[in-house]
Image (cartoon, grey):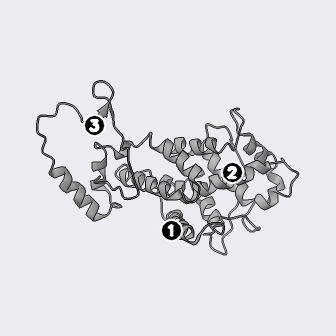
Amino acid sequence: MGEIILTHVFQDLRIEPSKSPEVTLFCRFRKHFDLLPHSSDQLLSKFDSSPFSEEVKVMLAGFRARVLALTKSDLSLRRDDYREFAELCTLFLDGVEDDSIVTFKRPGALHKARWMAKLLYSINICLLDKYISQLPRGTITTPQQVAKVREFVNFATLLYSEWWMTCSSAVDAPWHDLQLVHNLLKYKTVSPYVADSALRAFKQHLWYLTAEMIPLALFSSVVPMHERRGLADKLLSIQPMAPVDRPLQRFGTGFGKPAFPVDITESTNLLT
């Protein structure tokens, strides 16, 4: 699911027109990596909220605070590419301690099957934008790609990263999936095109928000107690009028597939 969302947004932004197995933008970044700084003790192009309204800035500050709290916590998904992603998110969102220096890892495999490369190298390219812009035009990025890559990185660090770093627990999945939909609806005030793209992809995979899977939230410690209590009460109140010989709310033949929720708004909770 995580790969589908990320790939959908990346493709809809039309950052990379090539259909080759490797992303040519990242190939150029790897080829010319030695022309760029290799650590964070240089002047970097970090996240900038100044173009947005005050109301949007408050919302983005909330996203940023939650992501930084996660990157600094003890997460189980904290190794190899996942560790590097957390470090780059912290650096891009300006959450690194003053005396800490992050070293940029040399680009490795860039083929499209290694989908984490989209995250890692896009953030690196954004951070090093000032130095890349001093190179001859087209050495790494084209003028059309710069804004698109930054738009992709803003989404990846502010919204996607929080969901990705908390998606390893099945009992927490209904809550985190619903929160991602809520956040994407809010993100329309920042980038409606990116938010709509991510929503289109995610709404095809709302498995954890089906009637069969939502009860997992009863065992989650991140779901507020009042929602867990309300969910338990609602489940206990169900009285079938007739014996049920197959699951309800399905489409297709036989037992079919679960029907995903259709109308999710910012006020939708696990009970509705």
Tag 2 or tag 3, which sits nearer the N-term?
A: 2
Sequence-first disc among 1 and 3: 1
Q: Are marks 1 and 3 in contact (CB under 8 Å)?
A: no
Tell me the amino acid under the disc marked 2.
Lys
Q: Tag 2, which secondary structure? A: helix
Question: In this rendering, is residue 173 above or below 103?
Answer: above
Q: Position of residue 255 (x, y in %)?
A: 28, 28
Q: Is residue 1 visible?
A: no
Residue 198 drawn above or below residue 54: above
**Camera-side residue of 220 and 174:** 174
Q: Residue at x 28, y 64 (%)?
A: 225
The residue nearer to you, when weighing 181 against 263, is 263
Q: CA distance from mark 1 to mark 3?
A: 36 Å
Whole-number angstrom distance, CA of label 3 to CA of label 2: 40 Å
Amino acid type of the residue that numbered disc 1 sits on in the rendered structure: Gly
Residue extending furthest toward the right: 136
List x then y, in percent, for residue 74: 48, 63
Q: Secondary structure at mark 3?
A: loop
**In the rendered image, is residue 173 in sight?**
yes
Residue 249 circle label: 3
N-terminal-most mark, 2 or 1: 1
Residue located beneath label 2 in the image: 148
Q: Position of residue 67 (x, y in %)?
A: 52, 63
Residue located 65% across and 69% down the image = 50
Q: Looking at the picture, how far across and down is residue 192, in whole percent?
A: 56, 53
Toward which corner of the image does residue 175 lie, by quadrant? bottom left
Q: Which residue is identified by label 1?
A: 62
SS at badge 1: helix
The foreground one among 200 and 247 is: 200
Report whether 169 appears left or right of 4: left
